[in-house]
Image (tube, rainbow, N blue to C red):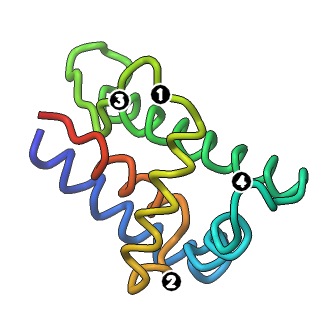
Amino acid sequence: MKIVRSSLLAFLVFASCLGSAHGLTGTDLYTQCFSKPELSLSASDSSFCYGYLQGALETVLFEEAIVDNGRGGSNLKFVCTADTLKMQQVFLIVRKYLSDNPDKLHWAAALLVHNAMQAAFPCK
């Protein structure tokens, strides 16, 4: 299990390096979604932001499925949220995380969303 976690962490760090060159960075996500009040976001920006955050959360579920390898045995969770979690809450959590961690904004945005959710909803 420790090897799987270490391998996944190494992959995420590697992916963050690749993502910063060609994909969306934390700076990009912050600028488009969080640098102005949420109510002043255009409809297209709002759709993009909520869609990106939803996709990043789906990636966390995918990561858990990869680690589990479809066998249903590991029960490894990276993020332990309530079933009642709303995207508005995710938006606020990620905005706060990015604001509190400006030194990481050059990282891949998906990794930062993952880290924000893991910090807010750690599994015990």
Residue type for callout 1: Leu
Asked whether, in this view, residue 93 is left or right of residue 20, the answer is: left
Residue ID for mark 2: 106
**Mark 2 crowd level (few <14, some 14–19, many ≥20, 10 Å Cα):** some
Residue 87, percent across and down? 59, 36
Point out the frontmost of discs 2 and 1: 1
Q: Which mark is residue 81?
A: 3
**Mark 4 crowd level (few <14, some 14–19, many ≥20, 10 Å Cα):** some
- In the image, residue 96 sits, relative to residue 79, either above or below, namely below
Residue type for callout 4: Cys
Dot 2 or dot 3, earlier in sequence = 3
Dot 1 or dot 4, earlier in sequence = 4
Secondary structure at numbered mark 1: loop
Point out the frontmost of discs 2 and 4: 4
Residue type for callout 3: Thr
Dot 3 or dot 4, earlier in sequence = 4
Asked whether, in this view, residue 82 is left or right of residue 42, the answer is: left
Q: Which mark is residue 85?
A: 1
Label 2 and label 3: CA atoms lie apart by 26 Å
Dot 2 or dot 4, earlier in sequence = 4
